[in-house]
């Protein structure tokens, strides 16, 4: 249940006005693919759009949901009959084909409120191959006033056949000045804000997450482990023992950021292909974590052995 009407973030107003214009002029596509990196607010934007489309206010051209009609009340209560949210039933798992089959039944029925029917998928990256095929079949046969709002954090994993049936809306990392201004409500410590922004690679919601808890400290601890490995002060097996019970995806993203920065710092000097090979291996390991269920301790051991091998090459 949502306590207040969601609004798009300030850095999303261009996309918001474009879609609202299409909606108000009756040329809204039947499927929207919201693409961009994670933690830039796509899910919030999508939910705000759901509320606006299901708002029954008679006021013409309002920018956002009124919050005071039956449609808005149902959305806020979390039980609007013309809205379906599809996401993994269990954290870290895939969206199942049975969930998509239920969507097929939903789109074949008339809207209860006489307006739009909306299906939000968060996110298509978490769908099994079979689920994507089932979704494609539904998209190929649009049903009246029905709109799909599909969130994707990794556009490269969305089949081209699905992309071709959607209007793609891109959400890049917003300008740093906009993010810093937005983060001021989370902290008045400028140095802390800048560090959180750097650690999050400019992603506003991730930076806010860092500021709200102990993640900066946890990341510093992980970097200390990598430093100890680099200089031979701890073995890969010992380091893996310290990491295997922590959130693997979080650590992997920190690891990728560090190696990416290492490669960037060497762009003006001697390029070392092994850095890029290792970065590619981290990307594959991240995908492996998402798509399967590897033994985390063995995974970290393998990556840390490669890390120490890389350190020996660069130090020498």
Image (cartoon, rainbow, N blue to C red):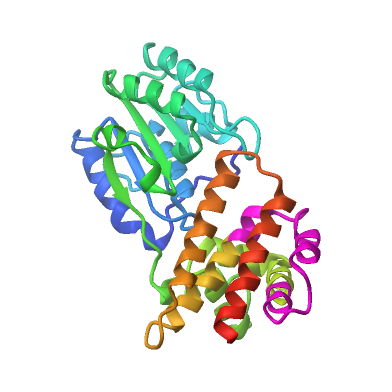
User: In terms of secondary structure, what is the magenta stretch mainly?
Assistant: helix
Q: Is residue 137 above or below residue 282?
A: above
Q: Is residue 286 visible?
A: yes
**On the picture, is 193 further left or further right than 67?**
right
The image shows residue 103, relative to residue 18, as above or below, that is above
Percent x, y of residue 27: 19, 35
Is 22 contained in the magenta span? no
Query: Toward the viewer: 51 or 245?
Result: 245
- Give the quadrant of the N terminus: top right
Examine the rendered structure and indicate whether residue 221 appears above or below residue 15: below
Q: Is residue 101 left or right of residue 315?
A: left
Q: Is residue 69 visible?
A: no
Q: Is residue 283 above or below residue 216?
A: above
Q: Quadrant of residue 253?
A: bottom right
Q: How many marks?
A: 0
Q: Quadrant of residue 49?
A: top left
Is residue 239 within the magenta segment? yes
Which segment is the magenta one? 225-252
Q: Which residue is painted at 71% across and 51% down in the image? A: 298
**In the image, residue 32 lies at what x, y percent?**
32, 38
Residue 226 in the image, given as x and y percentages of width and height: 68, 73
- In the image, 23 versus 43, the foreground residue is 43
Tell me which residue sits at (50%, 56%) in the image: 283
Quadrant including the C terminus: bottom right
Looking at the picture, how far across and down is residue 30, in whole percent?
27, 30
- Using the image as rendered, state which of residue 61 and residue 254 is in the foreground: 254
Q: Is residue 23 left or right of residue 210?
A: left
Residue at horizontal 38 percent and vertical 36 percent from the top: 149
């Amino acid at each position: 249940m949502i306590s207040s009407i969601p609004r798009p973030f300030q850095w999303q107003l261009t996309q918001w006005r474009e879609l609202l214009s299409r909606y108000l002029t009756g040329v809204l596509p039947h499927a929207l693919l919201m693409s961009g990196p994670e933690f830039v607010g796509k899910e919030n934007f999508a939910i705000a759009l759901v509320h606006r489309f299901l708002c029954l206010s008679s006021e013409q051209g309002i920018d956002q949901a009124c919050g005071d009609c039956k449609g808005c009340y149902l959305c806020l209560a979390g039980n609007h009959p013309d809205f379906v949210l599809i996401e993994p039933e269990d954290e870290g798992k895939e969206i199942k084909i049975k969930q998509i089959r239920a969507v097929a039944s939903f789109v074949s029925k008339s809207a209860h409120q006489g307006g739009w029917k909306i299906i939000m998928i968060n996110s298509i990256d978490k769908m099994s191959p079979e689920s994507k095929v089932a979704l494609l079949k539904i998209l190929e046969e649009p049903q009246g006033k029905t709109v799909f709002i599909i969130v994707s954090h990794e556009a490269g994993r969305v089949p081209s056949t699905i992309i071709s049936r959607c209007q793609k809306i891109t959400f890049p990392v917003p300008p740093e000045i906009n993010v810093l201004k937005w983060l001021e409500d989370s902290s008045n410590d400028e140095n802390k804000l800048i560090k959180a922004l750097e650690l999050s690679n400019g992603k506003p919601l991730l930076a806010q997450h860092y500021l709200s808890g102990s993640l900066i400290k946890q990341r510093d601890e992980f970097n200390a482990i990598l430093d100890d490995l680099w200089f031979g002060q701890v073995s890969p097996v010992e380091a893996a023992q310290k990491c295997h019970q922590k959130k693997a995806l979080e650590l992997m993203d920190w690891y990728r950021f560090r190696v990416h920065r290492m490669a960037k710092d060497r762009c003006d000097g001697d390029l070392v292909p092994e850095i890029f090979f290792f970065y590619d291996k981290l990307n594959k390991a991240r995908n492996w974590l998402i798509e399967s269920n590897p033994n985390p301790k063995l995974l970290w051991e393998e990556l840390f052995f490669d890390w120490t091998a890389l350190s020996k090459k660069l130090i020498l």
